Amino acid sequence: MTIDERLSFFHELIGCNYQVYLWCYSADLTLLHTDCSPGNASGDAVSLADFSSSLLDYVKSGGRMPFILDTLPGLLYIAAFEYTGSSLNRIHIMGPAFTGRNSHLLLKKELDNRDFSVQLRSVIFRQLDRIPIIPTNQLYQYTVMFHYCITGEHITANDIQFSPGSDASGPDELNLISEEHRGVWTAEQALLKMFRDGNPDYKKALERSTSLSSGIKSDTGDSVRQQKNNLLVLLTLCSRASIEGGLNPSVAYTLNDLYAGQIEDCRTTSALSALARKIMEDFVQKVQHAKADNGISPQIQAVCDYITMHPKEKFSITDFAKRTGYTEYYFSHKFKQETGKSVAEYIRSAKIEHACILLSGTHMGIQEISDELGFASRSYFSSSFQKETGMSPSKYRRKNSRT
């Protein structure tokens, strides 16, 4: 079968459930042919989505994997590429499709902000309801099959690439293929073990878990909100598993807060997918580095972890020595030898790290933070913060506030 014959058969199969269209473009995005009628608003949607620049940039970068275009809220297109050797022959696009029950409402709201004529707006709005709603995990399966029809290459959902989101700096959505929970816990534990081990092959375990569970069983009707909820759960699981794998809890919790903010800033499913990959890769790499660099004994590491997880407490070397079974002198000497810091220096650093989180993520006053972390005075807190971070608490807040 030729590529066009395979695509025609594939299109017929999808048509049993969803009405989607196929476009075929030349390498410079000149339309060659489409099965979308000229009077259909979906035909205009290719131009309305305005994804030509991101698509051409992807091609120029050497990208060959299928590319999901998500430049309007909840409205997706799939692009796949036909090469002969190193020469791009044609670009095939499938879509559009919505990814949530209220995606068309989000899109209407977005289009209301654009300078379209009344006539064009009327045509578009009349036909938005005809665009199919395809669950994201099923859309990913179609993407894999679409790519195979054109290239004959077997890939997985992990190979799919995404257009950059306009509001995000950079997971795979957890969606169920089955409504059952059989094997979910086992698959989840296998995935978390890979994060504890810092195993870069976590993508295989992720693919297994996503085939079994879509995470939170709550139909919000908003695919972006649903994916955010699932990604927040995944973020929490990854951070906790990474701590168990040896990552400093303070680092893990700080990353957790940072990425949680970035998740909420995302506006599209593509941006969330790209961010999820970044999150998982970051945690795995940091666990790898922690395992490679950490020459600290279990007794001293347990004290370090306790300090970073309880920065508001008052600590004493006597208590730590009892915890480890060492004399106070031996504990202090061993702690400095293994961590490179005295106990007092380590405690101060842990408190300042927590202060950074409070300054950037809350509205607590500087005096309030100083008191909560047990500093003798605001001036001592400020001088300690300046020494540790190179800037005053107020300056740090101005530069890093996420509230």
Image: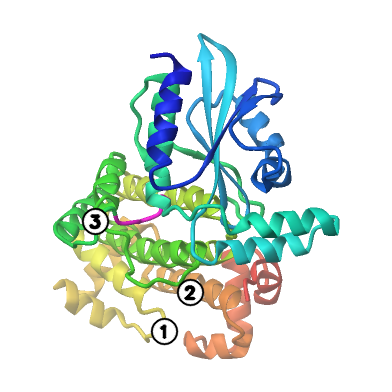
Q: Is residue 318 depicted above or below 387 in this figure?
A: below
Question: Which one is earlier in the sequence, the residue at label 1 or at label 2?
Answer: 1
Between label 2 and label 3, give the one nearer the viewer.
Answer: 3
Q: Residue at x 43, y 52 (%)?
A: 136
- Is residue 281 visible in the rendered structure shown here? no
The residue to which callout 2 is attached is 354
Q: How many marks?
A: 3
Work out whether residue 59 or residue 361 is closer to the camera in this orientation and state it: 59
Residue 312 got which mark? 1
Q: Residue at x 36, y 61 (%)?
A: 234
Work out whether residue 327 or residue 37 is closer to the camera in this orientation and state it: 37
Work out whether residue 298 or residue 44 is closer to the camera in this orientation and state it: 44
What is the x, y in percent for residue 398?
71, 72
Q: Residues within 10 Å of mark 2 (few under 14, many from 20)?
A: many
- Is residue 394 visible in the rendered structure shown here? yes
Q: Amino acid at mark 2?
A: His
Q: CA distance from mark 3 to mark 1?
A: 45 Å
Q: Residue at x 31, y 57 (%)?
A: 242
Which image quadrant for residue 102? bottom right
Q: Is residue 400 depicted above or below 167 in this figure?
A: below
Task: Tell me if label 1 and label 2 are in contact, CB under 8 Å.
Answer: yes
Residue lying furthest top in this view? 85
Q: Secondary structure at mark 2?
A: helix
Which image quadrant for residue 243? bottom left
Q: CA distance from mark 1 to mark 2?
A: 9 Å
**Which residues are drawn in magenta?**
171-176
The residue to which callout 3 is attached is 178
